[in-house]
Image: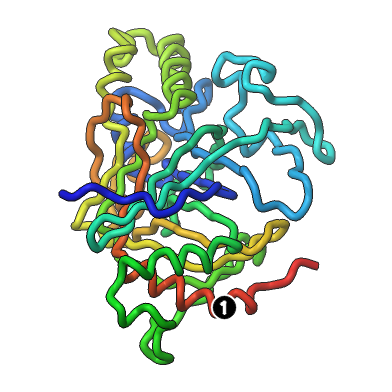
């Protein structure tokens, strides 16, 4: 395989890695003795963490995050101060002001592929509600957004890696027609084109806070069930877990590439990793069976290089950017 050439490096406005949407990961944790999403008696809460970073792109200062969204410092046996969090309130709810987080995407070209390599320098852990943990209805499960101000620059930079017939704008009618999608109760409007995924590799265990979380939760599990297999050697069990999701060609996986407008944010370019079939079923803790959409193949990772990346078809990526750039003006305007 040839090496990849670095094309551009951009700050990421928002990153969301919904590892909780993976039944493969839930099954791996459950089979090794973890109660996901919580123990039957409710004494141990064990949601699969979501990796979240909200770095840039706001139209106004960020509001504090209320506690029902967060994996709290006390769940990690840490204080808010150790994480740099400031406790406050939002309305009548307990909330936290989080420090500035920092994520970049390195955009590389390799032959006929585009590699989107995430450099995640700052993040926090969030959770879904117990009712929302079943990912059956979820299609998008990993996504990032960069400012739309980089769109023209990126399109221009890509042209030198494409056949000359793409050097001008695509001939009307030859470009794929973007789809419109509205999410978050109307707070997010996007226009996107589906782009083939050639490869992806995203690892839950490569985040230091997740490793800390797993060790703390293992101790909590052993307090209520000291004779479980997990408790014979929690450190060994955690180090043996398969926590990296990679592309499985038997799963219909694709990327939604396009433009987005989220309430309170500037217009953005988005990439969303998605899968919609087949469905799989696992044995649950609170339910006998949980059905959801397959995400990929679980593999072992030693968590040393901490790579998080997505590889797409270059031709499809370029066409998606060209096609959806024409819809920027159709995104909602902030009131």
- Nearest the eye: 33 or 119: 119
Q: How is the image coloured?
A: rainbow
Q: Is residue 224 visible?
A: yes
| Left or right: where 273 falls relative to 63 | left
Q: Is residue 234 above or below residue 242?
A: above
Element under disc 1: loop
Q: Horizontal and vertical percent for residue 227?
A: 32, 9
Q: Horizontal and vertical percent for residue 200?
A: 30, 49
Q: Residue at x 28, y 17 (%)?
A: 237
Q: Is residue 242 above or below residue 132?
A: above
Q: Horizontal and vertical percent for residue 218?
A: 41, 16
Q: Is residue 291 visible?
A: no
Packing grade of label 1 (10 A; few <14, some 14-19, many >=20) is: some
Locate the C terminus and report the quarter of the image it occupies. bottom right
| Left or right: where 206 falls relative to 229 | right
Q: Hey, which quadrant is residue 276 in on the image? A: bottom left
Looking at this view, name the residue that lies furthest to the right: 91
Q: Hey, which quadrant is residue 190 in on the image? A: bottom right
Q: Residue at x 57, y 78 (%)?
A: 327
Looking at this view, name the residue that lies furthest to the left: 1
Q: Residue at x 23, y 36 (%)?
A: 299
How many marks the image carries: the answer is: 1
Q: Residue at x 40, y 52 (%)?
A: 107
Q: Which residue is mark 1?
A: 327
Q: Is residue 73 above or below residue 277?
A: above
- Nearest the eye: 26 or 157: 157
- Nearest the eye: 257 or 186: 257
């Amino acid at each position: 395989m040839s090496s990849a050439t670095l094309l551009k490096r951009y700050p990421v406005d928002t990153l969301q890695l919904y590892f909780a949407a993976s039944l493969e990961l839930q099954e791996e944790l459950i089979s090794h003795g973890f109660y996901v999403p919580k123990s039957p008696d409710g004494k141990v809460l064990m949601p699969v963490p979501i990796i979240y970073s909200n770095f840039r792109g706001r139209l106004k200062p960020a509001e504090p995050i209320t506690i029902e969204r967060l994996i709290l410092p006390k769940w990690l046996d840490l204080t808010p101060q150790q994480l740099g969090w400031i406790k406050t309130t939002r309305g009548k709810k307990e909330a936290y002001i989080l420090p500035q987080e920092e994520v970049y995407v390195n955009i590389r070209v390799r032959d006929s592929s585009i590699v989107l390599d995430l450099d995640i320098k700052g993040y926090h852990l969030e959770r879904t509600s117990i009712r929302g943990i079943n990912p059956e209805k979820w299609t998008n499960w990993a996504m990032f957004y960069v400012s739309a101000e980089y769109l023209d620059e990126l399109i221009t930079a890509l042209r030198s890696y494409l056949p000359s017939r793409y050097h001008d704008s695509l001939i009307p009618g030859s470009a794929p027609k973007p789809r419109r999608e509205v999410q978050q109760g109307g707070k997010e409007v996007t226009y996107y084109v589906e782009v083939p995924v050639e490869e992806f590799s995203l690892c839950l265990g490569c985040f230091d806070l997740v490793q800390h979380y797993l060790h703390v939760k293992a101790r909590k599990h052993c307090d209520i069930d000291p004779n479980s297999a997990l408790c014979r050697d929690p450190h060994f069990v955690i180090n043996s877990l398969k926590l990296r999701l990679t592309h499985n060609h038997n799963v219909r996986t694709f990327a939604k590439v396009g433009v987005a407008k989220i309430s309170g944010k500037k217009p953005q370019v988005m990439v969303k990793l998605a899968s919609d079939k087949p469905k799989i079923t696992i044995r649950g803790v609170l339910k006998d069976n949980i059905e959801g959409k397959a995400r990929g193949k679980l593999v072992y990772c030693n968590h040393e290089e901490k790579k998080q990346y997505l590889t797409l078809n270059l031709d499809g990526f370029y066409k998606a950017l060209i096609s959806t750039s024409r819809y920027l003006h159709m995104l909602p305007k902030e009131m």
